[in-house]
């Protein structure tokens, strides 16, 4: 397994390209902007992208989905409770002064416990609402991709439509139950580990 992270867009979203380097298959997680840079990574690796996974559908995490879909024909994955947020992403972008292309409809509406894979890699879907209703994390192979549910030292905000502080507390507790050596790959900022977040995350005193 190889994971390449690239920070994209004015809101500095971490987009991840996860690949089975032997079978040359990959997953793209949270392509928020700068599709050309993401596609260059895919081309450099000679990869076939199977899925475009959105941990949630705020505009800064989905802005490059149209271009990636057109270039790769990969299936778009969102949680089944994230449809309204996905449909509203373009309007949300405009409200913040940004412009994104119309989003193609998702092919896969995932739910808790589903598996998403490429080549020999498998990741389990953890439904972790709070920042958004259909927020998900991908867990497997010693890592957890947390989107805007969990950051190094903090958590996602809950004041957007569909945000819920109590659900975020439940999601945080759930993530803290993962093995301590699990590497945290968040939607913004530096990577961490679950063990470190149990000790250092400022949100731990809220739950």
Image (cartoon, rainbow, N blue to C red):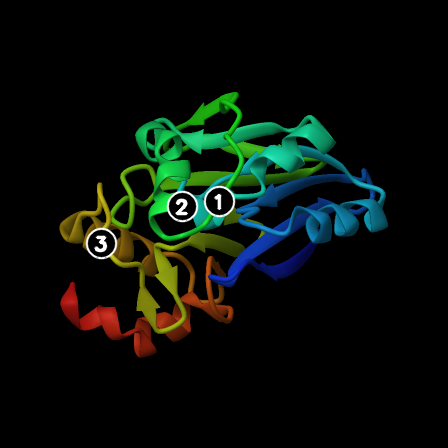
Per the image, label 1 sits on a secondary structure element best described as: loop
User: Is residue 96 visible to us here?
Assistant: yes
Lower sequence index among marks 3 and 2: 2
Using the image, determine if residue 120 lies above or below residue 17.
above
Lower sequence index among marks 1 and 2: 2
Marks counted in the figure total 3
Q: Which residue is mark 2?
A: 93
Alpha carbon of mark 3 to alpha carbon of mark 1: how far?
23 Å
Of the numbered discs in the image, which one, if any, rests on residue 158? 3
Figure quadrant of residue 75: top right
Query: What is the crowding at mark 3: few (fewer than 14 residues within 10 Å), some, or many (at least 20)?
Result: some
Circles 3 and 2 in contact, beta carbons < 8 Å: no
Of the numbered discs in the image, which one, if any, rests on residue 197? none
Lower sequence index among marks 3 and 1: 1
Using the image, determine if residue 72 lies above or below residue 188.
above
Figure quadrant of residue 110: top left
Residue at 81% from the left image edge and 38% from the top image edge: 23
Q: Quadrant of the C terminus?
A: bottom left
Place of residue 101 in the rendered image (x, y in percent of width and height, measured from the top left): 53, 35
Residue at 72% from the left image edge and 31% from the top image edge: 72
Q: Is residue 18 left or right of residue 139?
A: right
Place of residue 21 in the rendered image (x, y in percent of width and height, measured from the top left): 79, 47
Query: What is the crowding at mark 1: few (fewer than 14 residues within 10 Å), some, or many (at least 20)?
Result: some
Circles 1 and 2 in contact, beta carbons < 8 Å: yes
Alpha carbon of mark 3 to alpha carbon of mark 2: how far?
17 Å
Residue at 52% from the left image edge and 43% from the top image edge: 63
Which residue occupies the foreground of this view, 82 or 88?
Answer: 88
Q: Which residue is mark 1?
A: 99
């Amino acid at each position: 397994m190889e994971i390449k992270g690239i920070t994209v867009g004015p809101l500095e979203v971490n987009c991840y390209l996860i690949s089975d380097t032997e079978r040359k298959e990959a997953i793209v997680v949270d392509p928020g902007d700068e599709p050309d840079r993401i596609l260059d990574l895919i081309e450099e690796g000679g990869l076939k992208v199977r899925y475009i996974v959105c941990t949630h559908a705020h505009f800064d995490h989905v802005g490059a989905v149209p271009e990636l879909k057109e270039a790769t024909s990969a299936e778009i994955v969102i949680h089944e409770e994230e449809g309204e947020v996905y449909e509203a992403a373009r309007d949300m972008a405009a409200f913040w002064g940004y412009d994104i292309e119309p989003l193609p409809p998702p092919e896969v509406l995932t739910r808790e416990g589903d598996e998403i894979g490429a080549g020999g890699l498998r990741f389990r879907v953890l439904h972790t609402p709070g920042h958004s209703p259909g927020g998900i994390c991908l867990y497997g192979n010693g890592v957890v991709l947390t989107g805007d549910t969990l950051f190094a030292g903090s958590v996602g905000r809950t004041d957007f439509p569909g945000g819920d502080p109590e659900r975020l507390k439940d999601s945080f507790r759930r993530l803290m139950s993962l093995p301590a050596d699990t590497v945290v790959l968040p939607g913004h900022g530096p990577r961490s580990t679950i063990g470190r977040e149990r000790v250092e995350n400022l949100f731990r005193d809220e739950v």
